[in-house]
Image (cartoon, rainbow, N blue to C red):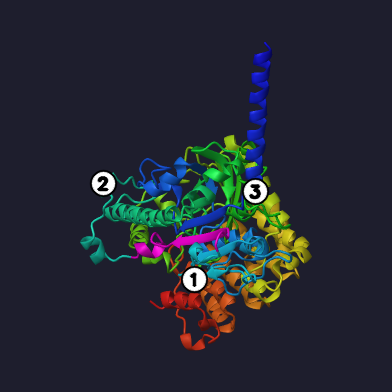
Amino acid sequence: MKKTTNYLFIVLICILTFTFQSCSNTNQLPPPNIVWVTSEDNSVHYMKIYDEGGVSTPNIESLAAHGLVFNNAFSNAAVCSAARSTIISGCYGPKMASHYHRKQKEVPMPDGLNMFPSYLRKAGYYTTNNNKEDYNIIKSEGTWDESSKKAHWRNRAEEQPFFHVQNFGVCHESSLHFNETKMKKNPTNFNVEDVKVQPNHPNTDLFKYTNAYYRDKIAVMDSQIGKVLNQLKEDNLMDDTFIFYYGDHGGVLPGSKGYLLETGLHVPMIIYVPKNYRHLVDFKEGSRVDGFVEFVDLAPTVLQLAGIELPKGLDGEPFLGEGINAEQVNTDEFTYSYADRFDEKSDMVRAIRKGKYKYVRNYQPFYYNGLMNNYRYKQLAYKEWLDLYKKGELNEVQSLFFEPRKPEQLFNIEEDRFETTDLAGDPEYAAVLKEMRALLNKQEESMPDLSFYPEYYLKENAFDNPIKFGQKNKENILNYKAIADLQILPFNEVKETLAIKLTSSDSWERYWALTVCSSFGEEAKSFAKTIKNIAKNDEVLANKVKAAEFLGITKLGNPVPVMTKAIYSTNDETEALLILNSIVFMRDIHHNYDFNIDMNKINQDVLKGKEAKQRFAYLLK
């Protein structure tokens, strides 16, 4: 008995000694290396690791075997600069005006915050970016040790921890800007007949080819990622390096990139967990994570993994790192997204996901998604889609892209992943709609969302310190949002309020009242006299144009003279883009008003920007 007791005592001492040594070794570990491998314009819908009909990506899948697959990772914006600005700042775009693409003017980081790699660098990390930035934000001093096509972790000091970003653009939207000749000469590796065309797309040979061609590009992207993994293996870094793979937003088939559909927002994200740092991850190796993560969470997650105290003011939350509980992460089922001006096309859309439900708020619902955007329509499939719509050869679901929207939309993503069945008007979902509306309102009001002012006004009055401007004008912003939300109520309930707001001394109360009237269309025709007066006499060009837009939608007046005079009157490109958006809307499908613009009357300052030039080039065709 004594021998047994002594033996057990010795075993216990050994166990305690081993545990102590293990803990000591863990505490003595240097910070982990972190590598981001980013691909442009990829959503989960086209990769086999997420969808059986997708393309195989063996290198990405190899990361999953020793890491985590995130089933619900989301970009907050559906276009590059807005998405990347969210990532680098750790802050939502609409509160700091970093969400307009392409930027008219850079905005600063919020007071007291830097772009997150600067915190890593200060803590001793070697920070490199190869090589895309595309921020709408003034770059913080000391963000990167190197940001170029030559940037590499191999340039660091010996034993120095590193954070490296490697970007691959082979899947970028531009890769689908092929012509018919190239299409005929270049058969795809992915079998065209194996492509299952989305229900919102026409099932044509061109759409099948475009699908298959895009999948070929994803396969090339995966092989490029394999080269980065091989370099890490050559350098014996796999045991000490977290590797994040993710798409920088969705895309890029028609109706994805640039739109707050799941195909534009729901991105692949796979994270390899190194052997020596598994203690920083509470999830089981090789598992799939169901909790929602969004791009605003990436900055705090990297800082948490690096053991750096999170600065105050970040909007995101870490989902990996010391003290982060897997069960808690898996309970998160919320993501928020935003779209405003993308290139020369203007809109204002906000959306949230909570679990299986997706709520979309279209603040200018009369604008249809398919409104001309030059870069989008370089893709042959876009052109064919529009042509088939004009010919009346699309079914109801395929036509939605070119039809006015409702102010509110609700989708069950589990049953309707391509968002073709709007549940917002179904009484069975009234409680869900109310809950989702409240969640979005809470999010919008908490920031607040600066886009209730037009972009050109923000550029002149807010871009020096957007956060400060938002807080100073929060009451006004919430007031404008309340006016905009009159759209979702019956017209008879809001008629008296609209009458007051249309004659308000506040320019932006009039602006939003006009927008609401346009969303009601002919229901609001009793305001025709007031709105005609605004179109003629308002002191704000944007209000004259919004009034003319209502008159054009309802056929109660000709918008052409007012809009044409407005575009001749402005000397600001950002204001011109707002006016031109309305002109294109009035000229194209549904309205077909004839504009004859004299370019000699356009202010030369307006023509300095690429986006305005694109609009004029389109209008002059």
Which corner quadrant holds the N terminus? top right
Where is residue 287? Give x, y as percent. Answer: 50, 37
Q: Could you tell me which secondary element the residue under label 3 belongs to?
A: helix
Place residue 534 in its image quadrant: bottom right
Q: Toward the viewer: 224 or 328?
A: 224
Residue at label 1?
148
In front here: 356 or 68? 68
Q: Secondary structure at mark 1?
A: loop
**Could you say which is closer to the camera, residue 340 or residue 58?**
58
Residue sticking out furthest to the top? 1
Query: Is residue 595 in view?
Result: no
- What is the x, y in percent for residue 277? 57, 45
* Image disc number at residue 455: none
Q: Nearer the viewer, mark 3 or mark 1?
A: 3
Q: Which residues are magenta?
A: 158-177
- The C terminus sits in image quarter: bottom left
Residue at label 3?
28
Q: Find disc 2 in the rendering and name its residue.
A: 193
SS for callout 2: helix
Crowd rating for badge 3 (residues with CA inside 10 Å; few <14, some 14–19, many 20+) = few
Verify whether residue 161 appears in magenta.
yes
x, y (%) of residue 106? 61, 73
Residue at (46%, 61%) from the top-left corner? Answer: 167
* In this view, the mark in front (2 or 3): 3
Q: Which quadrant would residue 373 be assigned to in this image? A: bottom left
Image height of 160 relative to 547, above or below: above
State the separation of the CA atoms marked 1 and 2. Answer: 41 Å
Marks 3 and 1, Cα distance to the nearest angstrom?
33 Å
Amino acid on which the number 3 mark rests in the picture = Gln
Q: Quadrant of residue 556?
A: bottom right
Residue 602 pos. (x, y %): 52, 85
Going by the numbered disc 2, the residue's amino acid type is: Glu
